[in-house]
Image: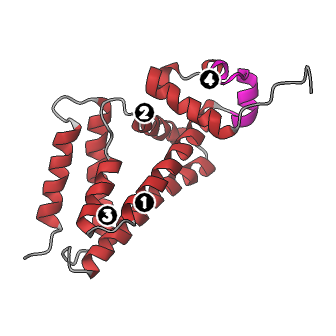
């Protein structure tokens, strides 16, 4: 109706805008006021929907992880060897480079989780769990087909993800001497040494 209030943008649009701001300006520039201006809402309206910046960041991370989860599912169900799909998993996991927006957000949410409530911690664990389950299933498939050595898929997945997390943090923060290409080489060498079946 004429003169009516402007409708708030859909929540996905707000979360996409938050991610875009992190990518373009960095996390420190993502304030409720700046995001509100970007999407045409007041900071008070944003707080009504998200209650706090912590909740906004976690929701944005969940939104981003949903998109990554779709891409991960596509990569892991394609017709390829288990090793090729494992390399694709690693490639998707490791940051694209220094200040990767997803990893920047991920590190901030985990830093804030020290004071998070049980619900927020459970939601973060659900994100971790999805990556872990997909990796365990892929490893189990590779073992069953004889592509991989007979490792315990759950234990190997836990160790591999710890390795990936450590290397990924180095890439995301721009630690000198640890660029993405170098990290991917390290991980592939580790997989060759520890996982490939003996010929």
Q: CA distance from mark 2 to mark 3?
A: 25 Å
The mark that comes first in sequence, 1 or 3, is 1
Mark 2 or mark 4: name the one nearer the start of the chain.
4
Please state if 57 lies on the left or on the right of 151 as rendered: right
Q: Is residue 152 above or below residue 40?
A: below
| In the rendered image, the vertical position of residue 31 relative to residue 133, given as above or below | above
Front residue of 126 and 93: 93
Question: To which residue does mark 3 refer?
Answer: 157
Query: What residue appears at the point 31 percent right and 45 percent down from the top-left corner?
Result: 94
Residue stretch in magenta: 36-51
Characterize the local packing of mark 1: few (<14), some (14-19) or many (20 or more) Cα atoms within 10 angstroms.
few
Q: Residue at image x 31%, y 39%?
A: 169
Check if residue 4 falls in the magenta segment.
no
| Dot label at residue 101 | 2
Q: Among all residues in the image, which is located at the extreme left?
A: 199
> Marks 1/4: CA distance?
32 Å
| Disc number placed over residue 35 in the picture, else none | 4
What's the distance in space between the residues labelled 1 and 2, CA to CA?
22 Å
Residue 142 appears left or right of 26: left
Residue 33 visible in the displayed image: yes
Is residue 38 located in the magenta-colored stretch of the structure? yes
**Of tags 1 and 4, which is closer to the observer?**
1
Residue 104 on image: x %, y %: 42, 33
């Amino acid at each position: 109706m004429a003169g009516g209030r402007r409708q708030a943008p859909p929540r996905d649009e707000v979360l996409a805008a938050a991610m875009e701001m992190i990518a373009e300006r960095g996390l420190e520039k993502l304030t409720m006021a700046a995001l509100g201006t970007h999407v045409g809402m007041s900071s008070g309206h944003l707080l009504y929907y998200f209650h706090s910046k912590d909740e906004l960041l976690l929701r944005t991370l969940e939104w981003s992880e949903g998109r990554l989860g779709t891409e991960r599912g596509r990569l892991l169900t394609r017709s390829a060897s288990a090793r090729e799909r494992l390399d694709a998993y690693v490639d998707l996991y490791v940051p694209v480079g220094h200040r990767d927006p997803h990893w920047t957000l991920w590190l901030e949410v985990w830093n804030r989780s020290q004071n998070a409530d049980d619900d927020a911690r459970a939601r973060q664990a659900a994100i971790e769990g999805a990556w872990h389950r997909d990796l365990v299933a892929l490893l189990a498939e590779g073992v069953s087909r004889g592509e991989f050595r007979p490792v315990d898929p759950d234990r190997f997945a836990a160790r591999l993800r710890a390795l990936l997390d450590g290397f990924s943090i180095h890439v995301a923060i721009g630690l000198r001497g640890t660029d993405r290409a170098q990290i991917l080489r390290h991980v592939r060498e580790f997989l060759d040494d520890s996982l490939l079946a003996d010929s």
